Image (spheres, grey):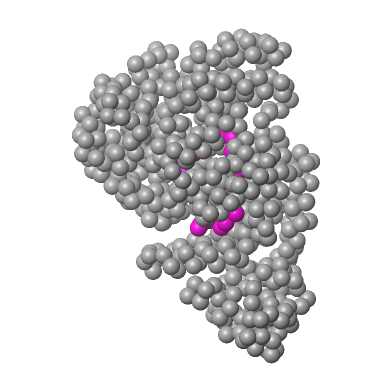
């Protein structure tokens, strides 16, 4: 029997089921967060809406609860099988009748799900967009009692979104075919253009938008100058996140394989994931990442959307993403459990050149290319900023942050110094101009530092007035100057000329001395040491992820070991059984009765029934 049909204890004085009671009874939570209650009440009352809420902010409850409170079955449109599987597993653990309808089911299994839907034996049904739009599925929904439609990862509907999925466009049919069923669209990232397209395509005109803060204060944002990215990554993991689960993003499949192998050789439990691997290998690696502790996945962007693992302690980028939306979405996979986590990226001039080349060579329209370049420029601005990264990131989404410092990004923890870079900029721009604007970074540096290479001699650039005028800076420093001038828009990379650096219109003002140029000092060694030192002093990002404050480590280990065994028995990820925060609560409170255990966040009625006696026995043994 569905949850929506049970529990006389879940009704208030008017006979209506009370949302807070269901929240507590089913999910073991004592209170709503942020705008959750307002959203739940709006949708339960039959209203449509758009919800923008950061990853880990509790979006799922915004449609799961109304589906339990309204008559019928909630239909959840989700783009990835992994997301459906994990969410359904968690709901079933909580006593909710939930199921999936996707390509992984056999004909008999799919038929059984369809039978349960028509028999009103489901609270929630997760469906892939391409499955929902088939005539068979639409005919099935016509016969069923539907409480609501939830379109998860709704940014996929927008061509300006960072994860556009063509099949999402067809979801406009929902509003036309089921006009009286409430629709809730949800996403963690969407700028104004993307929000508008979501509203237009999903028929949400006039419906309220609930926009939560995009801030993830538990995530530390760090961007370092790229030197040897693999070496830097290995040092970062060894010094800050040894034994932690993490995701490393690379742009190419070859780099994924190479990086995973390098990490494995360094003693990190690292696995590759990209579209070039066969489906069985991808599934095996993803399952290990989800079900085991301390596994690091090295992946292209083919991995991640819909990954519900709450204890990812870091997300690292070895290549620049395409936009701030993509960066925010990918880094947001860290710390979904609100515990200290790190978003780390190694970034250099080659990243900008590579992304610009990809945009220029794409088959998109000129409008699409222009928007893509604007989005890339915004991300480069975030990477180059000398102010608080969090403020810059949130400002992109239209959110103003109080105060100049967040206290948990590299720029706030170890503020970079600025120097007057006008003379260096003039030397570099002059060098690019006098060599014909036909050469890339390495050749320009050879000329500037007076390095007599075969190529320099071949083109006679040793005879130019700019030969050797930049000996006061080394190669690494000149690369930093180039990168920042590209970020400022005074130089651009020409994809038609194999990455040659060319002057832009604004370079004229720099060469004439009319435009000020301030450059950030590149001193990554001392800067990173300062951040590590502050971490060792016990600030947010260095607190142990696996233990609660003052909790006994032996009891923690026993609880985690028990959870792993239960997860293996049930064939679900460990966090589906109990979240780390719930284990922290048990270890901290040390309950001795079922009533005390029930009061711990994350312990609902079903979990108390299934696991209560075993958990109390573990606590007693630990005492």
Relative side of 204 to 82, left or right: left
Is the C terminus in the top left, top right, bottom left or bottom right quadrant? top right
Range of magenta residues = 305-324
Quadrant location of residue 537? Answer: top right
- Viewer can see residue 551: yes
* Residue at x-position 67% and y-position 23%: 557
Give 340 or 262, whichever is nearer the viewer: 262
Q: Residue at x 62, y 73 (%)?
A: 441
Q: How many labels sit on residues?
A: 0
Q: Quadrant of the N terminus?
A: top left
Query: Residue 474 appears in which quarter of the rendering?
Result: bottom right
Within the image, what quadrant is residue 45 found in? Answer: top left
Looking at the image, can residue 503 be seen? no
Q: Is residue 74 above or below residue 596?
A: below
Instruction: Give x and y (percent) for residue 53.
Output: 49, 42
Q: Position of residue 355 (x, y in %)?
A: 51, 63
Residue closest to the eye, 27 or 500: 500
Does residue 479 sit above or below 545 in this rendering? below
Q: Is residue 173 left or right of residue 498?
A: left
- 297 magenta-colored: no
Side of 28 relative to 62 (left or right): right
92 shown above or below 452: above
156 over 84 or under it: above or below:
below
Residue 438 in picture, x, y percent from top left: 56, 81
Q: Residue at x 42, y 31 (%)?
A: 85
Q: Residue at x 30, y 42 (%)?
A: 130
370 with respect to 589 (left or right): left
Question: What secondary structure is the stretch in magenta mostly built from?
Answer: loop
């Amino acid at each position: 029997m569905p949850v929506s049909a049970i529990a006389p204890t879940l009704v208030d004085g008017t006979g209506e089921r009370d949302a807070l009671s269901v929240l507590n009874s089913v999910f073991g939570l004592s209170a709503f967060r942020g705008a959750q209650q307002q959203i739940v009440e709006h949708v339960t009352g039959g209203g449509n809406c758009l919800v923008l809420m950061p990853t880990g902010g509790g979006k799922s409850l915004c449609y799961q609860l109304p589906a339990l409170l309204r008559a019928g079955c909630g239909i959840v449109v989700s783009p990835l099988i992994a997301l459906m599987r994990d969410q359904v597993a968690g709901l079933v653990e909580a006593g909710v009748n939930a199921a999936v309808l996707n390509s992984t089911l056999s004909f008999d299994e799919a038929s059984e799900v369809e039978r349960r839907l028509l028999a009103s034996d489901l609270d929630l049904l997760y469906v892939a967009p391409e499955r929902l739009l088939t005539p068979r599925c639409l005919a099935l929904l016509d016969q069923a009692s539907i409480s609501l439609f939830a379109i998860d990862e709704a940014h996929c509907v927008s061509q300006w979104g960072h994860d556009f999925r063509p099949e999402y466009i067809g979801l406009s049919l929902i509003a036309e075919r089921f006009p009286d069923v409430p629709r809730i669209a949800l996403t963690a990232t969407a700028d104004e253009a993307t929000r508008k397209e979501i509203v237009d395509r999903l028929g949400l005109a006039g419906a309220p938008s609930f926009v939560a803060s995009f801030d993830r204060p538990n995530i530390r944002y760090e961007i370092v100058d790229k030197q040897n990215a693999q070496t830097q990554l290995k040092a970062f993991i060894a010094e800050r996140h040894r034994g932690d689960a993490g995701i490393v993003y690379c742009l190419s499949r070859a780099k994924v394989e190479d990086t995973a192998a390098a990490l494995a050789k360094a003693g990190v439990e690292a696995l590759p994931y990209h579209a070039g691997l066969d489906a069985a290998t991808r599934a095996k690696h993803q399952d290990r990442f989800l079900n085991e502790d301390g596994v690091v996945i090295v992946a292209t962007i083919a991995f991640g959307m819909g990954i519900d693992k709450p204890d990812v302690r870091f997300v690292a980028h070895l290549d620049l993403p395409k936009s701030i939306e993509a960066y925010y979405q990918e880094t947001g996979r860290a710390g979904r459990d609100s515990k200290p986590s790190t978003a780390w990226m190694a970034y250099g001039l080659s990243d900008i050149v590579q992304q610009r080349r990809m945009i220029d060579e794409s088959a998109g329209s000129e409008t699409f290319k222009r928007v893509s370049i604007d989005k890339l420029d915004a991300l480069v601005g975030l990477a180059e900023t000398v102010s608080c990264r969090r403020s810059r990131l949130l400002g992109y989404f239209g959110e103003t942050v109080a105060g100049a410092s967040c206290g948990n990004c590299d720029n706030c923890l170890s503020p970079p110094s600025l120097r007057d870079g006008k003379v260096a900029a003039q030397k570099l721009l002059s060098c690019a101009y006098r060599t014909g604007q036909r050469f890339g970074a390495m050749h320009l540096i050879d000329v500037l530092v007076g390095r007599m290479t075969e190529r320099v001699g071949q083109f006679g650039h040793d005879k130019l007035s700019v030969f050797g005028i930049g000996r006061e800076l080394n190669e690494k420093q000149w690369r930093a100057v180039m990168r920042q001038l590209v970020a400022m828009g005074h130089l651009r990379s020409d994809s038609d000329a194999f990455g040659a650096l060319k002057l832009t219109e604004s370079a004229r003002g720099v060469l004439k001395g009319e435009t000020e140029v301030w450059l950030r000092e590149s001193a990554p060694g001392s800067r990173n040491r300062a951040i590590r030192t502050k971490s060792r002093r016990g600030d947010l990002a260095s607190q142990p992820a696996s233990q609660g404050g003052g909790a006994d480590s032996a009891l923690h280990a026993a609880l985690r070991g028990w959870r792993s065994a239960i997860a293996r028995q049930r064939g679900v990820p460990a966090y589906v059984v109990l979240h780390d925060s719930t284990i922290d609560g048990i270890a901290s409170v040390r309950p001795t009765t079922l009533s005390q255990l029930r009061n711990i966040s994350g312990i609902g009625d079903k979990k108390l029934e299934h696991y209560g006696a075993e958990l109390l026995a573990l606590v007693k043994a630990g005492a």
